[in-house]
Amino acid sequence: MRKIIGIFIMALALGGCSDFLEEYSQDLARVENYVDLDEVLMGDAYLPVGGVFRDEGIMVTENDRFQVIHYMSDELSKYIPSNYFGLEDIQDQYYGWHTWQQDVGLTRDGSSRNAEDEDWNQAYHSINICNMVLDAIDEQHAENEEQEMEKSRIKGEAAFLRALYYFELVNLYGKPYCSANLNSPGVPIKLSPVVEDKDYTCNTVEEVYAQIVDDLNLADTCLANAPVKNHPYRADITSVYLLKSRVYLYMQEWKQALEYAQKTLAKNGNLLDLNSWSASKGEVLNISSPEIIFSMGGYFIASTIYFQREFDYGEWLAIPVYTISDDLAAAYDEGDNDLRTQYYIRKDTLGYSYCDIPYSEGWVLNKVQGWNLDIRDVSDNFLFRTAEAYLNGAEAAAMRGDEGTAHSLLKTLRDNRLKNSGAITASGADLIAFIRDERQRELCLEGHRWFDLRRYTVNEKYPYSKKIVHYYTSYNNDTFQDEHTWSYVLEENDEAYTLALPYEVLKFQMTLGSNTRPPRTSTDYTPEPPTEITPPEEPKSPEYYEGYDTGYEDGYAAGLKDAEEDSMDAYWDDYNNPYDDDDHYEGYEAGFEDGYDDGFDAYFEM
């Protein structure tokens, strides 16, 4: 107890060093045993739950962290309506990341700056908590074997989380792992349980990965026989195996990547069969899925990019901020045979006639339906699914020349995703390309694609890179019309695949140095006008049809009468709408009009 309080006091004394090394939560001052450490771990090391929801009609975003990764890859494309619809705040928030700017915090006109260090600070805050738990857990008293196992579980979870945060950080701010980049700067490694009064420097990429592997080995040892607590929101041995598989995949250690993918599947090889799924069951990505291994944090991306899809006073309103890119949509090259084109993404009618935005077709995210604003029970970034284990194993096996294992793992996954999956016969470079495409299809917008594109550029056997184009549009605040659109290009093997360290961190910790993310230029771009389509009609309620039937009968009789008498008297005199509520009332009006026309015509056909 005295040691833990001493740590807390020292942290307060030295806490002015930097935001990302801020002092611990005051909750740590009350830690007296391993149970308290477990609560601190859950409350401060795991990411808080958050999401996008409505509060008294206002859209609220809570605890949004680690979102920028979704905007840098080739998965999303800026939706460019011809008229302003209040979407610029979101576009401006992610402008620097979406267009790969050297200084990601600056808005397009340079007039304001978005914070660059929020994810950095969150990661290091959580790492600090893990450090404290790992330093203190062994000294906590346990009265029996069961309590010793609880201590082991807590220690393993802390090691897993520290590895996960360092993995995220080094893949954002360090160059991708390969022999040529081992000595390039990564991120600072901090393992001590107190804030140290010193100037920090970045450890190398090799050193950061070595620490990640060490932490995962510790987590493996501690969680191998530990009890599972609150699955899937706490780490267990299966999540350790899957993260190990991922880390070794990035390190191009194919034997270990395959080994831990297979260990993952031995623990949980379940897949959701989309052949037995239906839209009536709701969103395909949810906590009831048998594929979920681990989930941490909140879900934001679907509602951030597409939060309004409804009939607005009878007009179809569907205005996303970003749509599924042509690149991602084209990856589903088997069309309707691939059930993910229904449940992962979907074609939708976009536009809003009230704001003169023409209706057109576009692909949108459907794993989670963002227009249904609510807190979700899975994460949009720190989500582990068994599908990844199949893909990790297939890639590692193919890289080792074990194509039979690769084919088998892919076939099992695709049997649960396609109506008719067919045999897989690709070999060599074609098989690797097929696996990469399958990762793009399967793991879309779950935080994998940007990291995958980075590591493909340094693959020693089959290197790959691509050119990506993103857009930004400005709008006139007086006329509400679009003013200008610019295009931005991420070239093959671009240095911008690595982020510069956050502006706020470099201002305070100048000893960290900086990487060489290049400046980004733009080109004028004129969007192609969309192919206009007819919007959907608002579905009518039973009350509407009840009113319609009554109105139709009255209208038909009035039409016959006026036709016979060559007048319009019955049209005005016999309209007798008995309803007060809107649906009945509107139905009667429409029914009377249709009935009158039909009755009038019917007289002359007698």
Image (spheres, helix red, strand yellow):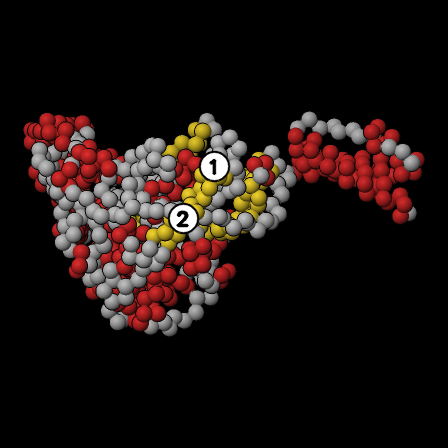
Specify few, some or many for label 2: CA neighbours under 10 Å numbering under 14, 14-19, or 20 or more: few
Is 257 left, or right, of 571 in this rendering?
left
Q: Position of residue 24 (x, y in %)?
A: 17, 31
Residue 238 visible (yes or no)? no
Q: From the image, tell me which residue sits under label 2.
A: 523
Residue 334, given in percent of the width and then of the height, sits at 47, 63
Kind of element beneath mark 2 = strand
Quarter occupied by residue 575:
top right
Q: Which mark is residue 475?
A: 1
Q: Amino acid at mark 1?
A: Tyr
Nearest to the observer: residue 321 or residue 592 = 321
Quadrant, the N terminus: top left
* Residue drawn at x 43%, y 32% as measured from the top left: 59
What's the residue at 67%, 36% (across, down)? 544
Q: Earlier in the sequence, mark 1 or mark 2?
A: 1
Q: Residue furthest right?
A: 565
Which mark lies nearer to you, 1 or 2?
Answer: 2
- Identify whether 37 is placed above or below 221: above
Q: Going 52% across and 50% down the picture, which residue do you hit?
A: 528
